[in-house]
Amino acid sequence: MVDRGMTSVFDRGPIPNFVSARLAVARTTQAACVFTALRHHNIDTHFLVREDDTRLRVKECRVRGLPLLSGATLADMIGLEVLFRLRATEKFCNRVAAGEVPIEKIDLPDGVTLEPGVKFQTPFVEASTKWRPGGDVYLSDSEAADVAGVTPAELERVFATTVRASFVIDKMCAETNLTLDDGKFEFARHRGSGTFMIIDGVSLDELGVRMGNQWFGKNLLRFFYKEQHKEWLADLEIAQRTYPDDKTKWPEYPPLPEDLIKLHVQRYERVAKNWSRWVSRL
């Protein structure tokens, strides 16, 4: 698995003129740290070893009908993104207020009202589509099982692994002065045993992480576009609904300020350094 230093947000594809070798190294370091920590806690992943600055050797799994690089595999990717919520974000609270998430499914501490920043007693786990043209959508548990081709019991096992893994990463973040709000995993199912393993990359790209009110990861870029380019984002959402299969009709990214790019990369490097120290003490 190779990191080529590109970045994308809002399912728009790679941001032009933003390819960073330093970012690739930092993300690879972060992923290796996460997988090492998960392995230490006996959570199965596809990670084998870090080969160089931007390359991880992993157990290959089949992704839909795509050809295999190794020529053989013993696992198949399930077509879901599995999302965990440790703390309430403003977006999640808005979904609850709109009736999209039943409040009774959220494990809040006694006497605590749902508001941004509140930590759940048990992580809230749900799934979304993985390859839906024009953007992914949230799924009910029964829909998720159907989309992934798994039984409800198997989906429960995937969700249980997600909870265990989220606790490991939450501890790593807390002990490196970060707050983990949420994140996502992808899974593959072993053909023989039917067990599931976490696959793909797990870095700040896949995690909602902050230090106080300062965003780390892709949320830093997302909030820039939401605050500074509201009209572009609205046009993008319309184009994604109208032309889900034709990205040539989607508006191009507005340029990112150079100082924001620099800050984004520096924060990835800072986290990579701190996580490396943390993992070395396991």
Image (cartoon, rainbow, N blue to C red):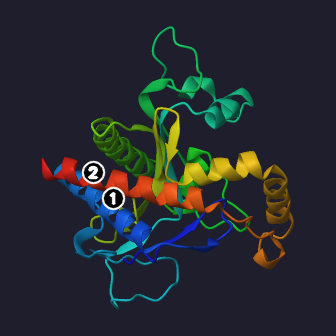
Q: Is any atom of residue 91 visible in this view?
A: yes
Q: Secondary structure at mark 1?
A: helix
Quickly name the residue at label 2.
275
Q: Residue at x 32, y 56 (%)?
A: 272
Quickly name the residue at label 1.
30
Q: Nearer the viewer, residue 282 or 216?
A: 216
Is there CB contact under 8 Å for labels 1 and 2? Answer: yes
Q: CA distance from mark 1 to mark 2?
A: 7 Å
Q: What amino acid type is highlighted by mark number 2?
A: Trp
Q: Is residue 278 left or right of residue 111?
A: left
Q: Secondary structure at mark 2?
A: helix
- Residue 172, image x, y percentages: 28, 42
In the rendered view, tell whether residue 165 sits above or below residue 134: above
Picture quarter with the N terminus = bottom left
Q: Is any atom of residue 42 visible in this view?
A: no
In the rendered view, tell whether residue 85 sits above or below residue 2: above
Q: Quadrant of residue 74?
A: bottom left
